[in-house]
Amino acid sequence: MEWIERRPPEGAPPDVVVWVSVARLDASWKGDTGYYIGRGGTGAAVAGRYEKFGDWFRRGDPIEMSVVSYDEERGCISFTDGRHRFAWLRDNGLRYLPVQVAQDQCTLIEALFGSSSTSTPTTRAADI
């Protein structure tokens, strides 16, 4: 599987890529109850989007990294983009993946959710 970065809006600083533990990120994301997608695409999923990502994945096209932030006030991860991708990959056994985070949250996200995996930005589909 090939990961690609989402380009920042014009004039915005680029995000930082952090490899994270899917299990730890998911445990925190459960606190974002209005947007959490449960196993099999249940919960706050947009109808059909979870399944469409599965079709996309099976084609073998590059996957845009999810963009996340940590809401310190609520104590949970929040997705700016890519929550359906994350949920599908989680449900299909991926243990580590790269996410994009704002530069000012990089150290915090790495400390809370960073993986000890030495993965590279290209991961084989067989890894999940």
Image (spheres, rainbow, N blue to C red):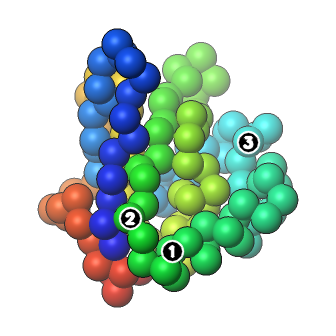
- Residue at the spot 27% in from the left edge and 71% down from the top edge: 123
| Kind of residue sitting beneath label 3 | Tyr
| Kind of residue sitting beneath label 2 | Pro
Residue 62, numbered circle? 2
In the rendered image, which quarter is residue 42 located in? bottom right
Residue 23, x across and y down, in percent? 48, 60
- What residue does disc 1 label? 57
The answer to whether residue 17 shows anywhere in this view is: yes
Q: Does dot 1 land on a helix, a strand or a loop? A: helix
Work out how far the residue at label 2 is from the one at label 1, CA to CA, in angstroms: 8 Å
The answer to whether residue 27 shows anywhere in this view is: no
Work out how far the residue at label 3 is from the one at label 2, CA to CA, in angstroms: 25 Å
- Residue at the spot 41% in from the left edge and 50% down from the top edge: 65
* Number of marks drawn: 3
| Kind of residue sitting beneath label 1 | Phe
- What residue does disc 3 label? 35
Work out how far the residue at label 3 is from the one at label 1, CA to CA, in angstroms: 22 Å
Specify the quadrant that holds the N terminus.
bottom left
In the rendered image, which quarter is residue 31 located in? top right
- Residue at the spot 69% in from the left edge and 37% down from the top edge: 32
- Residue at the spot 31% in from the left edge and 66% down from the top edge: 2
Residue 22, x across and y down, in percent? 45, 59
Q: Is residue 115 above or below residue 29?
A: below
